[in-house]
Every structure is written in C-alpha cells, then in structure tokens.
Amino acid sequence: MDKVIRFSTTISPSLLKKFDEILEVKGYANRSEGVRDLIRNFIATSELEKEEGEAIGSLTIIYDHDIRGVSDKLLELQHTFQGRILSSMHVHLDERNCLEVLVIKGNVKDIRKISDILIALRGVKHGKLMIAPIDKELDKL
C-alpha cells in the first residue's frame, strides 16, 4: 500500500450517525475502513460500466426443471461457453424448482451476454448477476 493521505469531508450529523450505525453492525474497526471500502466499490462499479477489461461474475438463477427442455438447454449452454463458465453449483429447492450458481470469467460484455442468454431461457424464473472487475490496478487500492 502506498503512503496514506488524510483528507476531510463535510457531512450532515444525521448521515454520519447512520453511517456509524452501519459500520458498527458490519464490524468495521473505524470510519476510514468503511470509507475505503465505499471508494473501492465506487471505482469498481465505474470500471464495470465501461464494459472493458476482465471480470468475474456469479450468476444465480432459479428455474422450474419441469419446464420441457430447460435443464438440457442450461447444460448445453454451459458446455457451449466452456472456458468462460468456470464452475456451477446445482441445488434442488423443492419438487420443481432448482437453483444454479455459475461462475463466469471473461470480458465484462461477454459475461453480461452469457448471463442474459441464460436468464432469458424459458423456465428460468429469476436470474441475478453479480460482477466484479479483475484488474491489477484495483489490487493497489
């Protein structure tokens, strides 16, 4: 880590009080750690908006396996995107519904495209992508 720089900011008492409450609940040692996390997240989110660079994504989908062909199509697409889809975890939620978590690595644009294809399949009830940049520059923050 580089040399540390101290800076100040102006904030309303009510906003600071709420921030402190959240820091305590989450177990932060101090405000500085919380602010650093917020800044890192802001930078990572901004980088993802560019849709450039390498990233890692976690796609969670819930689907009805009784819908004809949905399980086969999901498996087929996972093989189609082999090399991009690194891992999957399958959970049986009940008699009809399954949850699948896929780890996808690659270009941000490709990860979103693969996720959109999987979420749009007939039988998929819900899908959510969480994506984070893989950038050596971010490691320095």
Image: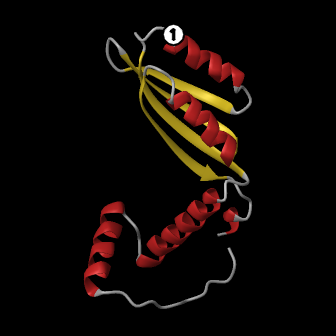
- In which quadrant of the rendered view does residue 6 lie? bottom right
Task: Say which residue appears at 55% left-offset and 39% top-offset.
Answer: 58
Residue that badge 1 annotates? 69
Q: Where's residue 106, x and y in %? A: 71, 42
Q: Residue at position x 32%, y 81% from top? A: 16
Vertical arrangement, residue 57 with respect to residue 71, above or below: below
Relative vertical location of residue 4 with respect to residue 111 in this rendering, above or below: below
Q: Residues within 10 Å of mark 1 (few under 14, many from 20)?
A: few
Picture layout, residue 36 above or below residue 93: below
Image quarter in which the N terminus is found: bottom right
Q: Residue at x 57, y 26 (%)?
A: 88
Residue 136 in the figure: left or right of residue 29: right
In the displayed structure image, the side of residue 81 where residue 14 appears, left or right: left
Q: Position of residue 64 (x, y in %)?
A: 39, 17
Please state which of residues 21 and 93 is positioned toward the viewer in this rendering.
Answer: 93
Res 104 quadrant in image: top right
Q: Report how many numbered discs are placed on residues in the image.
A: 1
Amino acid carrying label 1: it is Gly
Instruction: Between residue 89 and residue 3, name the one nearer to us.
Output: 89
Q: How is the image coloured?
A: secondary structure
- Residue 139 x, y percent position in the rendering: 68, 62
Residue sitting at x 63%, y 38%:
113
Q: Secondary structure at mark 1?
A: loop
Q: Position of residue 98 (x, y in %)?
A: 41, 20
Q: Quadrant of the image for the C terminus? A: bottom right
